[in-house]
Image (cartoon, helix red, strand yellow):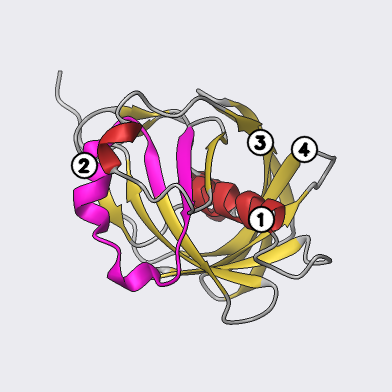
Amino acid sequence: MKLYNSDGSVAEMSGNGIRCLAQAAHRSSGRTSSVVYQIATDAGTRRVEVTPRSGTVVDASVDMGEISSIEAPSAWSTLGADPNRPVMHLSVGNPHAVVGVEDVAVVPLKELGERVPMVNLEVIEPGPESNAITMRVHERGAGITMACGTGACASAWAAVQWGLVSAKANDVIVHMDGGDVRVRVNEPAPGRVTLIGPSEHLLTTTAVLHA
């Protein structure tokens, strides 16, 4: 899998993109049972299980690998971030900066994201359910997007560490403008995360490449 952002840059990994790719492979195979795919990405090989649900929708579960801490981006100080706000800089195969806020809707996300274009910037708030968070994201190379799978994983991980969700909520619901996903923290092993959500086939197009 090779993924290009809207600005032409390459993304090492996309949690939503890999689920769509796995569904496309499953659909083209004509199989109707669950299938596990091993997909090579620039962030390493990822295991994706595709389970048909109904019609054009499947559930796709991705072992997203290890979450690790990274250094803050060099331009982080230009944000003038409130030192009392929780911040976590994480890698899910690609770089993320997660910030806890009271209300994601009022954050000037475009302005802030453009100041740190080298990372994906997520703002999160707890709820509305006890095991859920609400997230908005400014993605590296793409700007504000409706959803981000790797961002959901980083955000769920941070939310658990900060206690924004129930202490027993290792299965975190992440609400995004483009829909909801679930993130299982410390699965399939400690330090790893699994991303779970639906993928729906909308249409098929044919690309013609000219030398």
- According to the picture, the residue beneath numbered tag 3 turns out to be 67
Secondary structure of the residue carrying numbered label 3: loop
Query: Which segment is the magenta one?
Result: 95-121
Q: Is residue 147 left or right of residue 184?
A: left
Furthest residue in direction top, as rendered: 211
Question: Mark 3 vs mark 4: which is more N-terminal?
Answer: 3
Q: Residue at x 47, y 39 (%)?
A: 96
Q: CA distance from mark 2 to mark 1?
A: 26 Å
Q: CA distance from mark 2 to mark 3?
A: 24 Å
Q: Amino acid at mark 1?
A: Trp
Residue contact between numbered discs 1 and 4, judged by CB atoms under 8 Å: no
Q: Residue at x 68, y 65 (%)?
A: 172
Find residue 162 and name its label.
Answer: 1
Q: Amino acid at mark 4?
A: Gly
- According to the picture, the residue beneath numbered tag 2 turns out to be 114
Q: Amino acid at mark 3?
A: Ile
**Does the magenta segment cover residue 115?**
yes
- According to the picture, the residue beneath numbered tag 4 turns out to be 191
Measured along the vertical axis of the image, is residue 53 above or below residue 197?
A: below
